[in-house]
Every structure is written in C-alpha cells, then in structure tokens.
Amino acid sequence: MNGDALWTIGELARRTGLTVKTVRFYSDQGIVSPADRNPAGHRRYGPEAVARLEAGPLFRTTPGARRRSTHLAALSSVADAPHGLPPPPCDARTPTPRADPTWSEREDLIHTLRELGLGLPAIRRVVERELTPADVAAAQAEAIDLQIRVLRLRRAVLGAVARLGSTPEELTFVHRLARLTEDERGRLIGEFLTGVFGGIEDGGVGGGGRFAAVARSLTPELPEEPSVEQIEAWVELAQLAGDAGFRALLRGLAEVEAAEAAGTGLPRPGLAVAVRELAGPAVAAGVEPGSAEAAAVVAVLVERYGRCCAGAVPGEAGAVRDRLAERLGAMADPRRERYLELLAVVNGWAAPESWAAEVDWAVRAVA
C-alpha cells in the first residue's frame, strides 16, 4: 500500500467493504479521522483509516459483520428521523430484554465511550450488548489506575533527576531505584542498616537492643499507592543508603555511642539531648560561639559529656573536649538530617524538627 495515498470516502468504503454512509458515520463519531481535505472541502482518508476499518472487530467484513455494518448504515441514513429506530436483529443466543436504544441514545453512547478512552473492541461489545457499561467501566477504571501509577512513577523520576541534577548514568540508576519492588526495597535498606548497626554489641539489627529499635525507626516503608513526593523522597533516600561515606559516618557514630554507653553501664541522655538543652537557648539569644558567654555553655557541655562517656575517654579535659568536637562534627553532617527528612516524607510522618542550627553552633563554640 502506498503510504502517501489518500482516498475519498467512497473509495474508502469500497476498499473496506462498508457503505459510504457507514464510513461517514464512523468519521463523524471520530472513530476514523480524515487525513486531509481537497480544495472542495471533501474528506480524504489515509492508510491509517483503511487499517483501522479493516482491523477493528466492529468492522470485520465477515457475513455477520456485514449485517451489523448494514444495520449501522441504516441507522445513519435515518439519523434525522423524528421517531426512534426499529430494533436491530437479535441474536437468538443473546435475548434482548428491552427495546433497542434510539439513534440519539446510541450516538451519545458511542461518543461517551470514545471520550472515556475505550477502544473499538469494547465499543462493539457494548453496542451489541455483549458487555454492560458497568463491565467496561470497571475494566477501564482499572486500566486508568495502572496508567496513573506509571505516570506518577515517571513524574517522580523526572522530578528527582531535575532536582538532583543527575548525570546520564545517574538517571538510569534513579529510574531503577524508583522501579524496585517492595522486597527489593526491603533488601536494599536491610543491607544499609546492617552495615550501620550490624555486629555492634548493643544488640545489632537482629537483636533486641537499643540499636535494633533505632534501626526499625530508620526503616522507610513506601505505601502501596505512594504520591509523587514520596517516590521522589524514596529515590533520594535510597541514594543516601547506597552512599558508602554516609554509611561509614553512621557506623562510626553508632560504635562510639555503644563504647561510651559501655563505659558507664547506665542509661543516659544522648549527646544530642545535651546539645539541644544547652545550645538551643544560646542560639535563640544570639550568643556568638566565640564569646565568653558561649565559653560558659561549652564548659557545661564538656562536663556533661565527660560524665556520660566516663571510661571510654581519658579523663583529661582536653581529651574529652577533643572527642566532643569529633562527635559534634559527625553529627553536623547534613546527610544525617536529610535522611530523617526523607524518611518522614516516605513514611507519611510529620516533618522532624531541625536542630542543625544548634549543632552547628556547638561545633563552632567547642572548636
């Protein structure tokens, strides 16, 4: 077939075995569309229209299909009739319990089905009452739900790539992260948390110790129907989980905290609590980190930290302060707080309160 060929409506009817009125009817309904019009305004149809009319189940030129086409052509020929149309021939195997719809009703039905995105096979089966509108509506709704999920995923990947400024290689990686199954996501995060807490004598990930509870609290759980924002957050969080430097940072924090706890053998507030309690008011009051007022706050912070880690750090004030500065530097890494922010988005939690300003103040004041 010549890909550039165009046919008049009569030529198209002859090629497909349909009547001119039937083809005109399908064209008027948008089921087939003209590719062009000649200078006189007459419709001209291309190969796509031929293929659609020949391949569509509604238009197959079997004897039964020809009878249906003849009937629909008859409908189109009396579209302007003042009264309803006579009912179509009934298939004895499919009894019709009520009168056939009028021409305007049938026209409205076809138009509605097309607007709802149904294909020709589904339209034929509804028109011929092989399926009810409820049947096709349920199937179409399910198909649209699937399309929405796919589009949401694509939107999230594109948004993440745009926000993170990904390279071509990273784009492929981001797309793969977004398409992971629930089990694959679980394994990825499980490996990350095991790398952070696994083997630490406080209980580890698999045990019942404090770090096991911490690991559970750091586990993202993407819902079955995630929003675009949740998918984007998951992609970025998964990238953080795959960052070897970030994993080593958290591992170091966990090991130091476990060692310090072992030195006292007693439950105690964490360093983060002390920083919030002492640096928080100083930040709110605008105290400069290098001022004498700040030095008084630092002295209390060093003293409290020294009591907490007794036995794990030499008792000299200088050694305690050096260890404190090291701990605060690790705590100030922005990836740590970013992970918590992303975790809250993925899990649908309230956004965590940020203590970045307080930690940064303590880092500068202790240094």
Image (cartoon, helix red, strand yellow):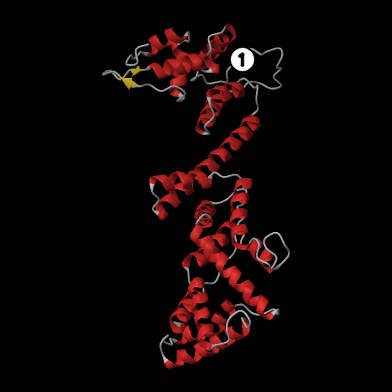
In x, y percent, where is residue 73?
51, 13
In x, y percent, where is residue 227?
55, 51
- Going by the numbered disc 1, the residue's amino acid type is Pro
Q: Secondary structure at mark 1?
A: loop
Could you tell whether 225 is left or right of 32 in the image?
Answer: right
Could you tell whether 91 is left or right of 271 in the image?
Answer: right
Q: Determine the residue positioned at 53% across, 62% down.
A: 248
Q: Quadrant of residue 145?
A: top right
Determine whether 249 is above or below 125 in the image: below
In x, y percent, where is residue 34?
37, 21
Residue 77: in sight, yes or no? no
Q: Quadrant of the N terminus?
A: top left
Farthest residue to the left: give it: 39
Total numbered badges shown on the rendered structure: 1
In x, y percent, where is residue 123?
56, 24
Q: Nearer the viewer, residue 54 or 329?
A: 329
Determine whether 182 is above or below 243 in the image: above
Q: Nearer the viewer, residue 305 or 320?
A: 320
Q: How crowded is the residue under tag 1: few (<14 C-alpha within 10 Å), some, or many (20+)?
A: some
Determine whether 202 is above or below 48 in the image: below
Please name the residue that numbered disc 1 is placed on: 88
Q: Determine the residue positioned at 67% across, 76% down.
A: 262
Q: Nearer the viewer, residue 195 or 222?
A: 195
Q: Quadrant of the C terminus?
A: bottom left
